[in-house]
């Protein structure tokens, strides 16, 4: 970095609110309105501070419909000197500082409120879910493609993250010896249990668990599936990290979700947080988790299906030699 660039970085972080923002972004991505609530400051003020951090290359902005997200800039993670500054800042101020501790508590409350909103949605819609999922997905085409992409080799263990009504456990039933689906919603899990029983699938089970931190040994599964879950999460990249931790060498992760879209009402009416994902973002999560993005498939709805969304299927693979220790993610 030049002297000017270095000065710019220190000027950007040399202010109380901006230091607080940096300490928050180290914890995870936030929308401007979440930051406004956590910091207890007006939106124009927070936006001004965020702009200064973005101009200094420390934070980056991502607009999605009516929401604007801020996260630590990829450059700040990749550049050794910038990431050293970010790390120093976060370790310097975590030692029990009253304001930063309170910000941290508010961050946790904000994440909890978000998770509660999604949980309430799934609690209220568990029994209706199989009907609801058909509203925005041309299902049979997608499912056929998912199975094709997963390959023909039978898995010893298949894990479905955010299993909901257990549809992926059913779909993959012939592809694994043993299957397990995790979900946070007890209501969804009881529908999944009934579905598996009805379909006479005895080699799969569902369990209550948080996909950010599962009670499973690393490198235990040949296939992990995350189907239509990531757009509900505050930290989708952390879920990918946890999925990567679970994969055996050369194991496959199948992610299915939406391509970027503008259907804002899905946030209000269906608890979506993110309006789809671009290939580049998924590639970044893969790289950060030691996976390789092998394929990115696009399944577009027919012209007459105006309300339907473009669906993406991403196939990712764990390396042959998993040397990098994949740590359990916290989110
Ligand atoms: C849209 S449903 C998808 C269900 C299923 N994969 C499907 O495609 O039909 C998303 C599911 O993710 C679950 N979920 C959301 N956050 C979760 C978390 N942190 N841990 C486990 N499950 C979660 C919800 O309870 C819900 O059942």
Image (cartoon, rainbow, N blue to C red):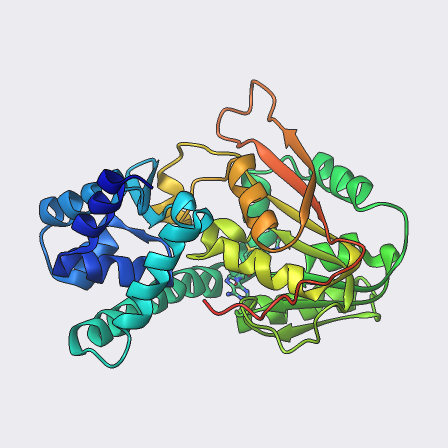
Residue 164 spot, x, y in % from top left: 60, 61
- The image shows residue 60, relative to residue 110, as above or below, that is above
**Residue at the image point whose x is 63% and y is 66% from the top:** 326
Q: Is residue 164 left or right of residue 32?
A: right
Q: Is residue 226 visible?
A: yes
Quadrant location, the N terminus: top left
Residue 122 spot, x, y in % from top left: 48, 61
Quadrant location, the C terminus: bottom left
Q: Nearer the viewer, residue 258 or 308?
A: 258
Residue 276 spot, x, y in % from top left: 48, 39
Q: Is residue 89 left or right of residue 324?
A: left
Residue extending furthest toward the right:
153
Residue extending furthest toward the top:
303
Residue 135 spot, x, y in % from top left: 55, 40
**Residue at the image point whose x is 88% and y is 56% from the top:** 174
- The image shows residue 17, relative to residue 56, as above or below, that is below
Q: Is residue 263 left or right of residue 276?
A: left
Q: Quadrant of ligand 1?
A: bottom right
The total number of labels drawn is 0
Q: Nearer the viewer, residue 205 or 50?
A: 50
Q: Nearer the viewer, residue 196 or 163?
A: 163
Q: Nearer the viewer, residue 2 or 73?
A: 2
**Residue at the image point whose x is 20% and y is 60% from the top:** 19
Q: Is residue 163 visible?
A: no
């Amino acid at each position: 970095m030049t002297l000017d660039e270095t000065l710019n970085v220190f000027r950007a972080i040399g202010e109380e609110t901006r230091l607080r923002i940096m300490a928050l972004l180290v914890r995870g991505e936030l929308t401007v309105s979440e930051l406004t609530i956590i910091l207890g400051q007006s939106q124009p003020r927070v936006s001004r501070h965020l702009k200064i951090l973005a101009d200094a290359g420390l934070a980056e902005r991502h607009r999605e419909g009516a929401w604007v997200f801020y996260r630590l800039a990829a450059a700040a993670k990749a550049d050794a000197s910038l990431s050293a500054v970010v790390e120093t800042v976060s370790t310097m101020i975590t030692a029990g500082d009253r304001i930063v501790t309170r910000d941290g508590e508010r961050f946790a409350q904000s994440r909890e409120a978000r998770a509660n909103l999604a949980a309430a949605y799934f609690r209220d819609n568990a029994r209706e879910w199989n009907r609801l999922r058909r509203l925005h997905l041309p299902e049979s085409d997608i499912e056929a493609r998912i199975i094709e992409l997963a390959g023909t080799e039978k898995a010893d263990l298949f894990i479905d993250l955010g299993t909901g009504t257990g549809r992926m456990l059913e779909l993959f039933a012939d592809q694994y010896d043993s299957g397990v689906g995790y979900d946070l919603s007890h209501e969804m899990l009881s529908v999944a249990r009934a579905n598996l029983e009805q379909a006479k699938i005895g080699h799969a089970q569902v369990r209550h668990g948080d996909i950010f931190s599962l009670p499973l040994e690393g490198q235990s599964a040949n296939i992990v599936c995350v189907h239509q879950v990531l757009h509900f999460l505050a930290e989708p990249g952390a879920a990918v990290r946890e999925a990567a931790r679970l994969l055996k060498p050369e194991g496959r992760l199948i992610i299915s979700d939406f391509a970027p879209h503008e259907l804002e009402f899905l946030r209000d009416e269906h608890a979506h947080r993110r309006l789809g994902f671009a290939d580049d973002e998924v590639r970044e999560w893969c790289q950060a988790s030691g996976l390789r993005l092998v394929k990115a498939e696009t399944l577009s709805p027919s012209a007459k299906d105006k309300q339907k969304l473009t669906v993406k299927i991403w196939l990712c693979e764990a390396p042959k030699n998993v040397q990098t220790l994949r740590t359990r993610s916290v989110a």
